[in-house]
Amino acid sequence: MKKPNWDEYFMEIAKVVKSRADCLRRQVGAVIVKDFRIVSTGYNGTPHGIKNCTEGGCERCLLRHQGKLESGEKEESCICLHAEQNAIIQAAYLGVSTKGATMYITSNPCSTCAKMIINSGIIRVVCYKNHHDEGGIKLLKKAKVMIEIKK
């Protein structure tokens, strides 16, 4: 059995984290790592104390799933958090710095998440490219955050 390198190891963990997502449309997992140790994890879904998407917690997700909204329509009404946002928030909640960390994500970050990644001090992102919003990749590159896209 071949021992995985660090990127493979943490991406596999991000895939497991993604399995906790309760989104009707897609599942994403994120892991923040510093000094080869997991700082926090996050997956996409509703905030704490709010019903999950599959239970009707986010009306926008439900309407989108039912085909009553187009992709991108009424995005501002979605109450869900992205995996990257949840991972950063969890680190802050626990009082753990993300400065100098690497984030592993099962999707490329959107523009909003890229802004949060930049301002949280994360210096490297490893991800798969499967999200329509490629603005996040461009923004991370502009901010000189190292980004590695896995196939």
Image: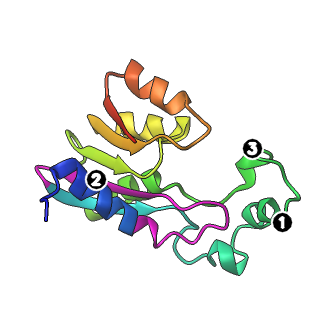
Q: As drawn, which residue projects farthest toward the right?
A: 68
- 33 inside magenta stretch: yes
- Camera-side mark, 2 or 1: 1
- In this view of the protein, which residue sits in the foreground, 91 or 60? 60
Whether residue 102 is visible here, answered yes or no, is: yes
Whether residue 93 is visible here, answered yes or no, is: no
Numbered mark located on residue 72 in the image: 3
Badge 1 amino acid? Gln
User: In the rendered structure, which disc, 3 or 1, sits on the residue that comes first in sequence?
Assistant: 1
- Camera-side mark, 3 or 1: 1
Give the Cα separation between the discs numbered 2 and 3.
Answer: 27 Å
- 103 inside magenta stretch: no
Vertical order, 34 against 124 (above or below): below
Q: Residue at x 61, y 67 (%)?
A: 23
x then y, percent, for residue 140: 40, 28
**Image-based side of 16 in relation to 131, left or right:** left
**Image-based side of 71 in relation to 20, left or right:** right
x then y, percent, for residue 120: 33, 41
Badge 2 amino acid? Ile
Look at the numbered disc 3 and give the secondary structure of its residue: loop
User: In the rendered structure, which disc, 2 or 3, sits on the residue that comes first in sequence?
Assistant: 2
Q: Which residue is mark 1?
A: 66
Q: Which residue is mark 2?
A: 32
**Chief secondary structure of the magenta portion:** loop
The 10 Å Cα crowd at callout 3, few under 14, some 14 to 19, many 20 or more, is few
